[in-house]
Amino acid sequence: METLFAVLHVVTAVFIVGPMAILPMTAMRAVRAGDARQVETLAKSTNLLSLLSLLVVLFGFGVMGLADKKYELSVTTPWILWSLILYVVALALTLFVVVPTMRRAAEALRDGTASRYPAIAAGSGVASLLLLAVVVLMVWKP
C-alpha cells in the first residue's frame, strides 16, 4: 500500500503540479500575442490544477502514515514541515495572485489596456521557485 501511495504522490506531483507551474508561463506568451481568450482559459486551468494539487499533499500524507516506523516521519520532521510550508505559500500565491492577475490580464487585453505581464511573471516565477525548493527537499531529505 505504501508503494501505491508513493506512486500516486509522484505521479500527481508530475502531472498536476508541473502544469500548475508551467501554465502561467504559457499565459504570458498568450498575453504577448494579445489572445485574451487563451489567457482566460489558462487562468481557469491554472486554478483547477492548483486546487487538484492538494491531492499531492493527501497522497504524501498517505506515504508518511504508511512509512516504516524506523524513519520516524511526521509533520514535524523538518524537511516535511518546510515542504508543506513552501507548498502552501506557492499555492496561495498561485490562487490569490497569479490566477486573478491572469484573469485581469485577459480583461485588459479585451479592453486594450495594460497587459499585467510583469505581475504574472513575478508571481508565477516565485511560485515555481518555491515548488522547486519542495522538490529539492523531497529528494534531499536533509
Image (cartoon, helix red, strand yellow):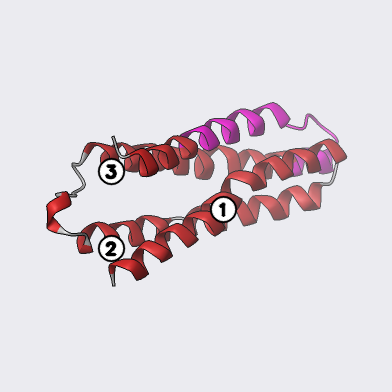
Q: Is residue 120 magenta?
A: yes
Residue 53 location in percent, x, y?
Answer: 46, 55
Assign the C terminus to one quadrant of the image. Answer: top left
For the point 28% across and 38% down, the residue is: 79
Residue 5 location in percent, x, y?
Answer: 34, 66
Can you tell which quarter of the image residue 61 is in? Answer: bottom left
Residue marked by disc 3: 80
Question: Which amino acid type is shown beneath numbered disc 3?
Answer: Ile
Mark 2 residue element: helix
For the point 58% across and 44% down, the residue is: 21
Question: Which amino acid type is shown beneath numbered disc 2?
Answer: Gly
Q: Which span is picked out in magenta?
A: 106-130
Above or below, 73 against 59 in this view is above
Residue 108 location in percent, x, y?
Answer: 77, 38
The residue nearer to you, when weighing 112 against 5, is: 5
Mark 1 residue element: helix
For the point 40% across and 60% down, the residue is: 9
Distance between mark 1 and mark 2 Cα atoms: 24 Å
Residue furthest out toward the bottom: 1
Q: Is residue 125 left or right of residue 107?
A: left
Distance between mark 1 and mark 3 Cα atoms: 25 Å
Instruction: Assign the magenta stretch its main secondary structure.
Output: helix
Above or below, 65 against 94 in this view is below
Image marks 1 and 3: residues in contact by CB distance under 8 Å: no
Residue marked by disc 2: 62
